[in-house]
Image (cartoon, rainbow, N blue to C red):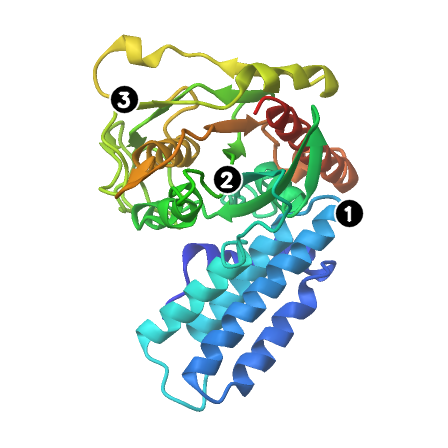
Amino acid sequence: MQLTAEEYCLSDPRVARLLAGSPLRELSGRFRARMASAQSLERAWETAEAEGLSLWRTAREAASTTSSEDRTLYWTRLSLTAYLRRSYAAPFPVGHHDRERLIALVERASRGMSELSFHSAPDVRHLLISGFDPFRLDAAADHSNPSGAAALALDGQHIECGGRRAQVRAVIFPVRFRDFDRGLVETTFRPFLTPRLDGTAAVDLLMTISQNNTPGYDIERWAGRRRTLEARDNKGDYGAHTTTRGTSQIVPLGPTAGEREFEQTSLPVLAMLQAESLLGTDTLRENTSRLPEQGGPAVRGSGGNYLSNEVFYRAASLERTTRQVGALTRESIPVGHLHVPLMEPPHTWSDDAAYAERRHQIAGHVGTIVRAALSGL
């Protein structure tokens, strides 16, 4: 199997420097050894999932104690999938689809998706958040994505605000159009939105998070149901899965998405805005572009028409369409999107420490905003 565009970037010297000093480095060697010792395909599947989960947990522990580092998780995951794609030689037959399943197991587990569940007392709220992988790798392979860093830092944390308590769980999505078209967002979130026998759901709030293209924090009001063809994803694909030059066209999302032109945030915005005074010099606003009033198809949401808009649209549409499933119904659940400040590539900063400090600060600010949202539930 050929390496993907993301996996080819493993040869970049900046990636090698990141991994050289990472606590995750030894996991790659252990993964190879344990996969090589698997004596059956079933055992290989178990090993791939277990090692992917170990990668997630190790990265989460490091993020909670150091500088909320997301890049080494991303690149270590790619080193595992590249090994499965090109180098894994087992003592039993491994076909193309078998390798694809092994890779999918590593991907899902190392993104926090395979262990995604809540374990807390009845009076503790459940908050589910998501971030994204690093992107814009063609400009700087050592780019971080503070939304992913925040997800790592907050996953599993118990928080309090306004007399309310909550447990936070998090996942990190890939920056790949194909994964979204295959229903990854819906597959991940649906179990937590489907009504239960008592009329509740497994979560009390769902907040998707991504990196902004501006310096501030934005709570997006609107998500639109079309995506741009101008921007590539991490595989080098445009929104229609081509590698040809982008166009100004827009395309509707796939059949797993809803049919409304726009979805609107239902997050407790007023409560969240109260957190601005705790963010130092950073700003926090609701991005209130009045897009539906312009008429016509939704060519973008208030936060643009890339995957950040799409994850918001898919999550909000899923929440709305799962309020009734068969004979079961539930109340609405707050869903929406938070954009965190843009972080320029590391080489534009004075030093690595300043870059890490800013990423850690943003992760902390996201925690502050999430606690403010809890107070508004």
Q: CA distance from mark 2 to mark 3?
A: 28 Å
Dot 2 or dot 1: first in sequence order is 1
Three-letter code for the amino acid on which mark 3 is drawn: Ala
State whether residue 93 is above or below residue 275. Answer: below
| Quadrant of the rendered image containing residue 73 | bottom right
| Quadrant of the rendered image containing residue 214 | top right
Picture coordinates of residue 58, whole percent (x, y): 68, 59
Three-letter code for the amino acid on which mark 1 is drawn: Thr
Picture coordinates of residue 215, whole percent (x, y): 60, 21
> Which residue position is annotated with label 2?
203
State whether residue 60 is above or below residue 260. Answer: below
> Which residue position is annotated with label 3?
298
Q: Residue at x 76, y 36 (%)?
A: 357
Nearer to us: label 2 or label 3: 2
Dot 2 or dot 3: first in sequence order is 2
Picture coordinates of residue 150, whole percent (x, y): 63, 39
Q: CA distance from mark 2 to mark 1?
A: 28 Å
Residue at the far front: name it: 198
The image shows a total of numbered marks equal to: 3
> Which residue position is annotated with label 1?
66
Please name whichever residue, 9 or 108, is drawn nearer the observer in this view of the structure: 108
Three-letter code for the amino acid on which mark 2 is drawn: Val
Question: Secondary structure beneath disc 2?
Answer: loop
Please name whichever residue, 237 or 272, is drawn nearer the observer in this view of the structure: 272
Q: Is residue 316 left or right of residue 349?
A: left
